[in-house]
Amino acid sequence: MGRVFLVVLDSVGCGGAPDAAAFGDAGANTLGHIIQACAAGGADHGRSGPLHVPNMDALGLGAAVRLSTGCQTPGLDATPKGRWGAATEVSKGKDTPSGHWELTGVPVPWDWHYFPDTVPAFPEDLVARVCELAGVDGILGNCHASGIPIIEKHGAEHIKTGRPICYTSADSVFQIAAHEEHFGLQRLLKLCEDLAPTLHAMRVGRVIARPFVGSPETGFTRTANRRDYAIEPPFDTLCDHVARAGRNVHGIGKIRDIFSGRGITDYVKGPDDKLFDALVEFGDTAEDGDLVFANFVEFDTLYGHQRDVAGYAAALEWFDARLPELLSRLREGDIAIFTADHGNDPTWRGTDHTRERVPVIVAGAGAKEIGLCAFADVGASAAAHLGVPFGPAGRSFL
């Protein structure tokens, strides 16, 4: 029996979502616009030239982008040696839980709650609850914001007053940033954990702890100790099915947080370079029938939200350069599926996620076009390969 490596490149969408206009994202195309910017010399900061991702392109990445939107992909013109396609989401969101849940067989059955793009953004009773739990007399932020700029704006006042920095985005999230030393990491995590039930009752998808370090003089830096407190999936996901069959589910990155630990045997967290080390190690140690489920978040957090085209391109090239380390460890009968959970076009207006299709490329399953498929088809295919049950959503493309 083979293994499945399911790898989510967070936010690496490929445009073409049929309902993108309803989200204000008609024309957004994360990969397509990065490819075109690189070819035009518009991403020559810290790297240069056309986007160079030969390993993913050989599996069908360029073909998947062209399938999704019909756009040109200069520099990505390989004849696919893998199985390739593009997946469309049906959940009414463009966020991490919606994408990951649906990839594993659970389209979100409700509408998420979103906070208005006003100042203040949060209702008074929610602010009062935060203050009560944190033991403070107020909060900072209370608005829609991107994480790094709002820390730079309020970091000094946070250190002086002890008030946590609270903000949201176009996603269904409540984020709290606090200094690991001045506020305390464990205090921040406990605050988010204690607050989560209140937010979950409102159908807010995640409470996110955003710890940072530094000073006003040296600047502030977010750390890898982020923690997501997410609503539990309402039905069994691929992780539950694999675990119930007596197999291991190895979570890499924020997978455990996204699924509230359900079905996860063990997990590894840290920056993306360390996560790739862990992915390679599981290539050596995971047992037959195991699911290795990884999320690489820095495409999204460091480059998509920051609208950094060159940085995003360099991150894709870094990932592609390391990919042979994993592919060389695939055994007979293993498959590796590479996909994404939503888009975050670094050429787009604003700083939020973008509603897009996502590429699906598969190593170990031969060369074949999957075509346009559903997010849930990814989980259905993984379940079929592992020989475990799956829910009603999705069909295997293997």
Image: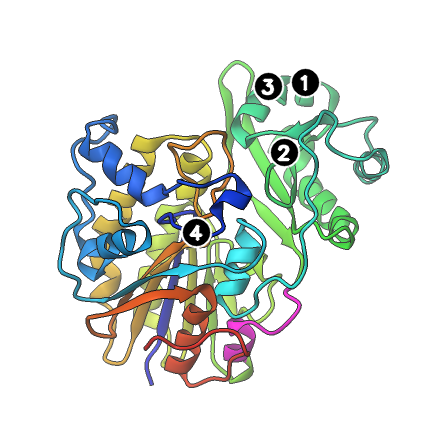
Tag 3 secondary structure: helix
Q: Nearer the viewer, residue 272 or 396?
A: 396
Foreground tag (3 vs 4):
4
Foreground tag (1 vs 4):
4
Of label 2 and label 1, which has the lower sequence position?
1
Q: Which residues are magenta?
A: 233-243
Q: Give the vertical position of 336 relative to 111 (above or below).
A: below
Tell me the quadrant of the picture where the N terminus can be found. bottom left
Foreground tag (3 vs 1):
3
Based on the picture, tell me whether residue 378 belongs to the magenta stretch: no
Residue for badge 2: 177
Q: How many neighbours does mark 2 have within 10 angstroms: few (below 14), some (14-19), or many (20 or more)?
A: many
Q: Give the vertical position of 70 relative to 130 (above or below).
A: below
Q: Amino acid at mark 4?
A: Ala
Q: Is residue 170 left or right of residue 360?
A: right
* Mark count: 4
Residue for badge 1: 157
Tag 2 secondary structure: strand
Q: How many neighbours does mark 3 have within 10 angstroms: few (below 14), some (14-19), or many (20 or more)?
A: some
Of label 3 and label 4, which has the lower sequence position?
4
Tag 1 secondary structure: helix
Residue 223: image x %, image y %? 51, 37
Residue for badge 4: 17
Residue for badge 3: 153
Tag 4 secondary structure: loop
